[in-house]
Image: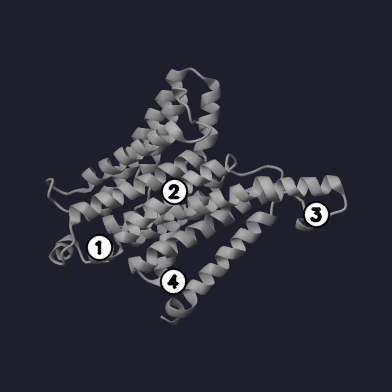
């Protein structure tokens, strides 16, 4: 309890700052002091790396990690299931299918956002609505199913179906360049990070995060069950719609910017619950900071583990998240 009340936030902010510093300085063998070097060539290289290349990438890692984690925390509270997160429930796959359609049809905005982001949002929203419908155990007025196995199986099946549709779109396009581009993009990465994309990510994070924070008290009430929450005056249907809308917006922006990055939305909320408690007013901002820290560290590792090769960051998050997923699934 002492850790939760007195040390949780200071430690979290300390780790957050350390992750940013590490991500800015780790990677190419260029010293930060080269920014003030008398060697013009070394100074120019350092300015390009520390002034143009790394800052937008670090900011993208922070925003994507925070967005996925907040979305995961909201979905876990909605479904009352610690295994729920955008990647496992197929919401990210829905966004990826929308972005793939935009690329295959050569719609404007594949290298930015625009049409690609709109289709990604539409796909994520449809996927989240499908999971919501499949997770209800009865009629339109029934509560969400508490059967975790059923919910996860629906998410896995939906993700597989959407992935098959993505493969079909790529095959029908007849474009080898699209296949290579999508394959690498689906592994998850931040190599395409830019300030315009970061502005869109920031907008999605502010809007989606504000919606979820506005539902914090309702999410706390939902922990006791939908019937008890309704007796306390919570409008269940409205809360469900708002959370799904926010999770879809956050997931779509992340997919359009960084591809499929899984398990951050599972890992960060779990760590925050373990260290800071289950109160949604703590869980949501804590998950944002924790997710930003974790993805920033993973991106630094992706750049620095095997130089000059770069490991897709989605691979590292899966290596971290899958063991936790198996542990939680076994515990459940």
Q: In what element is the residue under mark 2?
A: helix
Quadrant in the rendering for residue 31:
bottom right
Task: Look at mark 1 in the image and give the residue it sits on.
Answer: 218
Task: Characterize the local packing of mark 1: few (<14), some (14-19) or many (20 or more) Cα atoms within 10 angstroms.
Answer: many
Whichever of labels 4 and 3 marks the residue nearer the N terminus, that label is 3
- Separation of marks 4 and 1 at Cα, in angstroms: 22 Å
Circle 4 residue = 275
| CA gap, disc 4 and disc 3 | 40 Å
- Packing grade of label 2 (10 A; few <14, some 14-19, many >=20) is some
Residue 34, labelled with which disc?
A: 3
Q: Quadrant of residue 227?
A: bottom left
Front residue of 209/16: it is 209
Q: Decide: marks 1, 2 in contact (CB < 8 A)?
A: no
Look at the numbered disc 3 and give the secondary structure of its residue: helix
Residue 1 relative to residue 45: left or right: left
Mark 1 and mark 2 lie on one chain; the one further toward the N terminus is: 2
Q: Secondary structure at mark 4?
A: helix
Mark in front: 4 vs 3: 3
Q: Earlier in the sequence, mark 1 or mark 3?
A: 3
Q: Which mark is residue 257?
A: none
Q: What residue is disc 2 on?
A: 203
Which mark is in front, 3 or 2? 2
Determine if residue 250 is in view.
yes
Q: Residue at x 44, y 58 (%)?
A: 267
Q: Residue at x 32, y 44 (%)?
A: 155
Question: Quick one: label 2 or label 4, which is nearer the N terminus?
Answer: 2
Secondary structure at numbered mark 1? helix
The alpha-carbon separation of the residues under discs 2 and 4 comes to: 29 Å
Locate residue 192 relative to residue 207 in the image: left or right.
right
């Amino acid at each position: 309890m002492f850790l939760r009340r007195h040390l949780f936030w200071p430690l979290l902010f300390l780790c957050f700052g350390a992750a940013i510093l590490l991500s800015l300085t780790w990677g190419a063998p260029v010293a930060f002091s080269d920014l003030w070097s008398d060697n013009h060539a070394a100074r120019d290289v350092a300015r390009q790396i520390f002034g143009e290349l790394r800052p937008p990438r670090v900011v993208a890692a922070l925003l994507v990690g925070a967005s996925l984690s907040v979305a995961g925390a909201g979905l876990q509270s909605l479904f009352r299931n610690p295994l729920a997160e955008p990647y496992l429930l197929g919401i990210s796959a829905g966004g990826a299918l929308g972005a793939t359609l935009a690329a295959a049809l050569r719609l404007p905005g594949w290298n930015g956002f625009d049409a690609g982001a709109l289709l990604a949002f539409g796909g994520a929203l449809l996927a989240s609505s499908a999971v919501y419908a499949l997770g209800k155990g009865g009629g339109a007025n029934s509560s969400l199913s508490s059967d975790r196995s059923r919910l996860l199986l629906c998410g896995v099946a939906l993700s597989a179906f959407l992935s098959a549709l993505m493969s079909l779109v790529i095959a029908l396009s007849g474009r080898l360049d699209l296949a290579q581009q999508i394959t690498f993009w689906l592994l998850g990465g931040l190599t395409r990070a830019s300030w315009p994309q970061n502005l869109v990510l920031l907008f999605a994070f502010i809007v989606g995060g504000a919606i979820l924070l506005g539902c914090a008290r309702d999410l706390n009430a939902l922990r006791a069950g939908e019937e008890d929450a309704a007796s306390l005056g919570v409008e269940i249907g409205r809360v469900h719609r708002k959370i799904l809308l926010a999770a879809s917006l956050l997931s779509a922006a992340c997919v359009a910017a960084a591809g499929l990055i899984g398990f951050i939305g599972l890992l960060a909320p779990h760590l925050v619950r373990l260290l800071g408690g289950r109160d949604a007013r703590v869980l949501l901002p804590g998950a944002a900071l924790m997710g930003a820290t974790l993805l920033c560290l993973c991106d630094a590792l992706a750049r620095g583990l095997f130089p000059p090769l770069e490991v897709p960051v989605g691979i590292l998050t899966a290596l971290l998240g899958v063991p936790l997923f198996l542990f939680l699934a076994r515990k459940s």
